[in-house]
Image: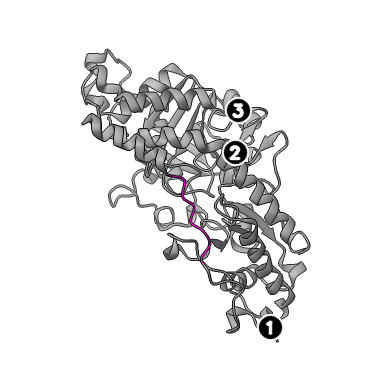
């Protein structure tokens, strides 16, 4: 008699899934050329031709802007740095409010805190999981200066609605597109759907250079301000003749020539990697289509999805068992990916806990012990603030990475067998909460 692995039975598969590795000989050759040049970074922190970086950085910026269809690209050393640059470029002052999604990596919100801004969390869309424009509008106050929207899981934001809000209320729309390079809405690339878009190039994204980020914008002023914040703005403004000094306190957010050389190679691979990712999504969805408790993610009309992760819904009432019990049982049937053993099986319940439930927001303590910048406002971060997001995270959503381009049809069939096994034996899970 078959027994679930979580109850001591034999798992469906023990051999690790293949590693997702996108770097190869092209990157090795590009790195060797930079090393042979003897110059691994060409930035100077003064107003000079090299204030904007070296040949590889500038070439990457030109190629990135051309690929995505933007006027300017600004390379930085991480997406987090890019978000900090973008918020600073807007001119956020202490006490200003920025509306942001709670269902994202923490840096999306903490980039606001860096400048003394106050994150105001709006709920997410029930079907697409991105920032809900209707709740954004309810959260706008006279202190609102910007909207920070995320193309979560690879799904483009509702750009028309958010752009309309931004225009009517004179707000800046910042798009965090760390998870969606190559996705489109109405023929436009993510990263170009707001006033600024910020990409991630860290190691577990679609393409990467180890660590890195890119800011896109069509706005000359915003591009210049991002360039200044990236590279010690305060030391440069006088020589450059900059008179708008708000937030011209700069950082060292510079990308090296090594990272830029790798990122250029990676950009050329994006189309092929996306194609394989989408094909694997289709295979997975076909493989579990007969399980009525599982719903594939919706795709926004006139959009393409980049599937950073595949976020599906689980209906506990249909299944007769809680989501966590079912998903944890499937996890027990499957192995980790090679090179990512410490991360465990790439299948989980929910995504990240809604950010406002983190101690940072619950205790309203960020910089110093006095509550700055929360002390400048009256934001309430109590549980229940974003009920759609909380419901998705706590009861409904599960995410996986079985659509990675390294996965084969055989690998995905093994995943399907694990889901089948747990579905057929789900009665054994009744009464289990996790």
Looking at the image, which is closer to me, 225 or 359? 225
Q: CA distance from mark 1 to mark 3?
A: 54 Å
Query: Is residue 205 placed above or below 140 in the rendered structure?
Result: below
* Res. 77 visible in picture: no
The answer to whether 418 appears left or right of 242 in the picture is right
Which residue position is annotated with label 3?
Answer: 163
Q: Residues within 10 Å of mark 3 (few under 14, many from 20)?
A: some
SS under mark 3:
helix
Quadrant of the frame with the C terminus: bottom right
**Picture coordinates of residue 87, whole percent (x, y):** 41, 33
**Picture coordinates of residue 153, whole percent (x, y):** 57, 47
Q: Residues within 10 Å of mark 2 (few under 14, many from 20)?
A: many
Q: Mark 2 or mark 3, which is nearer to you? A: 3
**Residue lying at the far bottom of the rendered structure:** 1
Q: CA distance from mark 2 to mark 3?
A: 12 Å
* Res. 286 visible in picture: yes
Task: Tell me what residue is drawn at x 52 percent, y 43 percent.
Answer: 179
Which residue position is annotated with label 2?
Answer: 136
Query: Is residue 414 placed above or below 371 in the rendered structure?
Result: below
Q: Earlier in the sequence, mark 2 or mark 1?
A: 1
Query: Is residue 32 placed above or below 245 in the rendered structure?
Result: below
Q: Which residues are magenta?
A: 16-23
Q: Earlier in the sequence, mark 2 or mark 3?
A: 2
Asked if the residue under mark 3 is in contact with the one under mark 2, i.e. CB atoms within 8 Å, the reply is: no
Q: Mark 2 or mark 1, which is nearer to you? A: 1
Which residue position is annotated with label 1?
Answer: 2
């Amino acid at each position: 008699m078959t027994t679930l692995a979580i109850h001591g039975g034999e798992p469906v598969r023990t051999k690790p899934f293949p590693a997702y590795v996108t770097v190869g000989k092209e990157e090795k050759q590009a790195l060797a050329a930079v090393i042979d040049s003897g110059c691994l970074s060409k930035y100077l922190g003064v107003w000079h031709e090299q204030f904007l970086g070296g040949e590889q950085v500038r070439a990457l910026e030109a190629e990135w802007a051309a690929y995505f269809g933007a006027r300017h690209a600004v390379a930085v050393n991480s997406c987090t740095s890019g978000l900090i640059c973008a918020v600073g470029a807007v001119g956020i002052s202490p006490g200003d409010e920025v509306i942001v999604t709670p269902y994202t990596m923490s840096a999306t919100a903490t980039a606001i805190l860096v400048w003394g801004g106050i994150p105001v969390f709006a709920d997410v869309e029930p079907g697409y999981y991105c920032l809900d424009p209707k709740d954004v509008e309810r959260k706008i106050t006279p202190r609102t200066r910007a909207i920070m929207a995320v193309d979560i899981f690879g799904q483009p934001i509702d750009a028309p609605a958010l752009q309309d809000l931004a225009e009517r209320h004179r707000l800046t729309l910042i798009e965090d597109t760390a998870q969606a390079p190559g996705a489109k809405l109405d023929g436009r690339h993510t990263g170009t759907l707001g006033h600024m878009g910020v990409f991630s190039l860290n190691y577990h994204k679609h393409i990467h250079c180890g660590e890195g980020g890119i800011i896109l914008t069509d706005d000359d002023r915003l591009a210049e301000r991002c360039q200044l914040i990236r590279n010690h703005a305060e030391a440069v403004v006088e020589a450059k003749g900059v008179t708008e000094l708000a937030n011209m306190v700069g950082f060292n957010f510079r990308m090296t020539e090594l990272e830029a050389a790798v990122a250029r190679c990676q950009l050329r691979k994006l189309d092929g990697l996306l194609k394989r990712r989408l094909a694997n999504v289709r295979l997975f969805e076909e493989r579990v289509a007969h399980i009525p408790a599982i719903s594939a993610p919706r795709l926004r009309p006139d959009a393409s999805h980049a599937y950073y992760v595949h976020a599906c819904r689980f209906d506990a009432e249909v299944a007769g068992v809680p989501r966590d019990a079912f998903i944890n049982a499937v996890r027990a049937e499957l192995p980790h990916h090679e090179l990512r053993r410490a991360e465990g099986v790439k299948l989980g319940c929910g995504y990240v806990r809604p950010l406002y439930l983190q101690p940072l927001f619950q205790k309203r303590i960020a910089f110093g012990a006095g509550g700055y910048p929360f002390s400048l406002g009256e934001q309430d971060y109590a549980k229940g603030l974003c009920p759609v997001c909380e419901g998705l995270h706590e009861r409904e959503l599960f995410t996986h990475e079985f659509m990675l381009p390294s996965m084969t049809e055989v690998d995905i069939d093994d995943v399907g067998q694990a889901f089948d096994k747990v579905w057929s034996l789900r009665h054994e899970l009744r009464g289990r909460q996790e």
